[in-house]
Image (cartoon, rainbow, N blue to C red):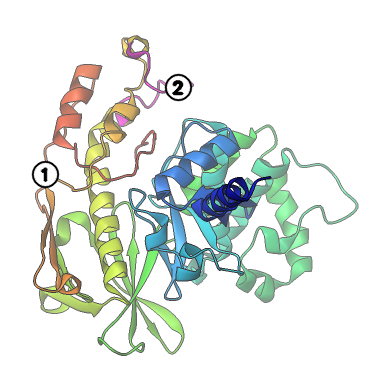
Amino acid sequence: MEGAEQKDFKENTFTMKNRFRALSVILPDNTELSMTVGFEDRGQDVLKQLCEFLDSSRLPLFGLSVVKDDQPLFLDLEQKLSLYLPKSWRKNTSKERVTLSLKVQYFIKNVEVILDSEARKLYYAELKGKVLRSECFEQEGLYFQLAAYGLQADLGDYKEHNFAYFSAQGFFPFWIVQKHGNDYILKHTPALHRELKGMSSSEAALLFIQESFTLSDVPLTIYRLTKEKNKRQGCVLIGVASTGLQISEVLNGQQQSVCDLPWPSIHSITFQGRKFEIRADGLHEKKLVLYSLSVLHAKNLLKHISSSHQLHLSMKPLVTRLRGKKGRHREMYITDGADLNTYDSDDELPPMKLLLDRVQKQTTGSSECRNVTGSDASNGFCCLEMSVDEPEEMSVDDPEDVLRLIELVEGVSVDGPLFLPISH
């Protein structure tokens, strides 16, 4: 090889090497995938590659999470990965594994249909993992019923065995195993499993999801904040749920509930720098002032709250319609919306893809986000105003009503999931 050609070859090799990066993605079922992504890739590019790998057309309600400042942080899928990952990764000098997690970002109760089976399995796996970490001590009996649903979903009908056919730690939180012991659980749980004979795995998974929502610490995403700006003490947890916010405090290592704030009770949420302020009915002096770990965490939390609130509003009319269809149960499916003629029948559900694909960066309507940046970007001020009087519900008896609904909730920020809401 000539000298000039050899030089060009080395330069091209160097350029190609620095154009791509390696990272791992952990799925809700604890499967770990090794991926190669472009240096300029955004979160949505990683999610698209995951869909292709999993042979899934879409991953509804999921987001990509990274641990930053010792706290999980959802990525803005429209931003570059390099904003969230270590400098060593950006410089391609990292010798340590860089890991992202695929997690449910928006929890919705009573999920009867998700676009494909793979997405449904991952949603179920996420909730199963959260149940194993749940600590609702006053609902101890519910964990046994959830274990029975989980066994039916994972193993099918009960079969007589001369040995323990499941691990207690795989279906019960540690505190229950510690309290009752393996022998007690392995002796009494099979009787509950046996009662579910004939139930399909998908139905058992659906019941598991529905019942898990009655555990207050399961269907929500937790953010950790502090009462004082420069102190890690006084930890306050904000849980973002589909119905509103749950506020709790950590005292002497124990988590204690402070209050629940349904969406209609919240008047406004603002942050300036790391200062985070919530004004709502049910709070002492009508407001709560907290501090996030960083400006990035504050922005991430505000966007998550705004998106969850808008998603809640946008689904209400569809939930109303589905409630009206109770008693006329039938198997229902959603396609990718390419052939809208399939929705001419009144028995079919409207194409939710039309609703949730209209994603924009800023929310509109009853939830508004305004950015007013001063001389220092880190001191930017942002306000989220929540409507106490929620919009009047619309009927969605035909696709034209869905299109009008889209116009009202055009600003839903859900990062493109395709999802069917069910009444709750």
Q: At which x and y percent is residue 118? A: 57, 37
Asked which secondary structure carries label 2, the reply is loop
Task: Give the amino acid type for the residue marked by disc 1 in the picture.
Answer: Gly
398 horizontally vs 368: left or right = right
Q: At which x and y percent is residue 243? A: 29, 53
Res 206 seen here: no
In depth, the one of 302 and 424 nearer the eye is: 302
Quarter-wise, where is residue 195 in the image?
A: top right
168 horizontally vs 81: left or right = right
Q: CA distance from mark 1 to mark 2?
A: 31 Å
Q: Which residues are magenta?
A: 323-340
Give the residue drawn at x 20%, y 24%: 403
Quarter-wise, where is residue 388 in the image?
A: bottom left
Give the residue pinned by disc 1.
Answer: 365
Give the residue drawn at x 75%, y 66%: 184
The numbered dot on residue 332 is 2
The crowd level at tag 1 (other Cα within 10 Å; few <14, some 14-19, many 20+) is some
